[in-house]
Image (cartoon, grey):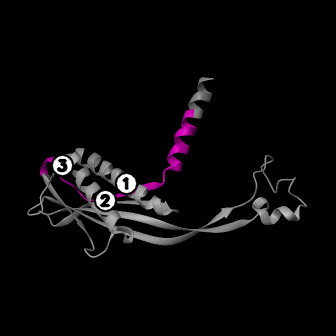
Amino acid sequence: MKNTLIVGFVGVLFTLGACNPVKVYLEKNEMANQQSFNTFYVISEYYDANAFDSPVLEENLQKRLTEGMERIGLEQNSEKPDLIVRYNTILTDRAKEINTMPMNPYGFGMNPWMWGNPWMMGRGMGGGYRVEKYDLGELVVDFIDTRQDKVVMRISAVGEINKPDHKSRNLKTSVEKILSEFAKTIET
């Protein structure tokens, strides 16, 4: 019984991790500890481009990055920051194949009840694949040490965007995950 509960709990954790819409990737150089960074400034890599072509999302992104860095314990300074937080967003058209084969309790082939029912094939009940288009949204944040004039860390967050409201939700999640990863790295 105890082993069944443990296996079930681990299965739930894997399922929750797999459902997460945003994945985070970290690249870093040797980085000084947190005490060496007291101030920061947030800038866009391309000053004339908006986040995902939306001025509203651009404003929200800058606000979230600024508030998150302040929560970490750094102070915003536009004159002479210790750390520049430079960001960029990328939106790419993608397509994926979706299996439309009905669930089969036997684990192989087509569901036996659908065999020979040609009128069901056009209603999504038959087998095969369909192509679904989506956008892949990416937020890339570079943390630049101004004293060394080099990027000490780059963190990217990538997520699938199927609906317009996913852009805002994924940006919020991406900023939270990126700043969490940054905070963990500078603490060690």
* Residue 11 coordinates in the image, percent (x, y): 57, 39
Q: Which residue is mark 3?
A: 33
Q: Which residue is mark 1?
A: 172
- Marks 2 and 3: which is nearer the front? 2
- Report the front residue among 74 and 11: 74
Amino acid type of the residue that numbered disc 1 sits on in the rendered structure: Lys
Give the secondary structure at mark 2: helix
| Quadrant where the C terminus is found in the figure | top left
Q: Horizontal placement of 149 versus 67: left or right?
A: left
Q: Which residues are magenta?
A: 9-36
* Residue 139 coordinates in the image, percent (x, y): 36, 63
Residue occupying the point 50% across, 68% down:
135
Q: Horizontal placement of 13 versus 114: left or right?
A: left
Q: Are marks 2 and 3 in contact (CB under 8 Å)?
A: no
Q: Are marks 3 and 1 in contact (CB under 8 Å)?
A: no
Magenta span contains residue 103: no
Q: Are marks 2 and 1 in contact (CB under 8 Å)?
A: yes
Q: Residue most toward the bottom? A: 48
* Residue 142 coordinates in the image, percent (x, y): 27, 63
Magenta span contains residue 10: yes
The numbered mark, 2 or 3, whose residue comes first in the sequence reads 3
Label 1: how many Cα within 10 Å (few below 14, some 14–19, many 20+): some
Q: Which residue is mark 2?
A: 60
